[in-house]
Image (cartoon, grey):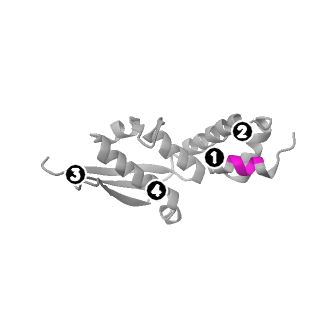
Amino acid sequence: MTISMEQIKQLRKLTGARVLDCQKALQEANGDLKKAKVLVEAKGLSRAEKNQERETKFGYIATYTHNTGMVAAMVEMLCETDFVAQNAEFRQMTYEIAMQVAAMGAKNAQELLQQDFIKDPEKTVELVIKSLSGKIGEKITLGRFERFVIGA
């Protein structure tokens, strides 16, 4: 089956995956966009699992303050290189996890990682991190986090 550039662009827009990964997934799925999306995501998670032995020496710290100013959170997300630490998508994810910490108040890392992600309840926080790790091709891990509440 011949896969068009338009199909590849569509899948890239949905997943953010590499062009070659999109093309291969579309070929394997016989042009079915939904099946190809599942294949691309599975490949990304597999890639993330392979990276788990690598060392994370760089990262980014994001903060979130609720609009009342009464609740805030700070999250440290770690990665392998300073290049990824500067990546806008990496930073946005870290910010959104800080928002998660402020809103949901996890007591520890394991609890936070198992929570449904507030931006996409069909995924856990752990799955969001692993998905980006697979997409970028680097190990990404949750470092430290803290939640601050006035009067608590």
The residue under the point 40% across, 35% down is 114
Which callout, 1 or 4, points at the residue further toward the start of the chain? Answer: 1
Label 2 Cα neighbours within 10 Å, binned few <14 / some 14-19 / many ≥20:
some
Left/right of residue 118 with respect to residue 133 in the rendered view: left
Marking on residue 33: 2
Task: Tell whether label 2 touches label 1 (CB within 8 Å).
Answer: yes
Residue 10 is a magenta residue: yes
- What distance separates the C-alpha of mark 3 from that of mark 4? 20 Å
Which callout, 1 or 2, points at the residue further toward the start of the chain? Answer: 1
Residue matched to label 1: 14
Task: Tell whether label 4 touches label 1 (CB within 8 Å).
Answer: no
Q: Which residues make up the magenta segment?
A: 7-11
Which callout, 3 or 2, points at the residue further toward the start of the chain? Answer: 2
Q: Position of residue 147 (x, y in %)?
A: 25, 49
Residue matched to label 4: 92
Look at label 1 and name its amino acid: Leu
Vertical placement of residue 111 versus 47, above or below: above
Look at label 2 and name its amino acid: Leu
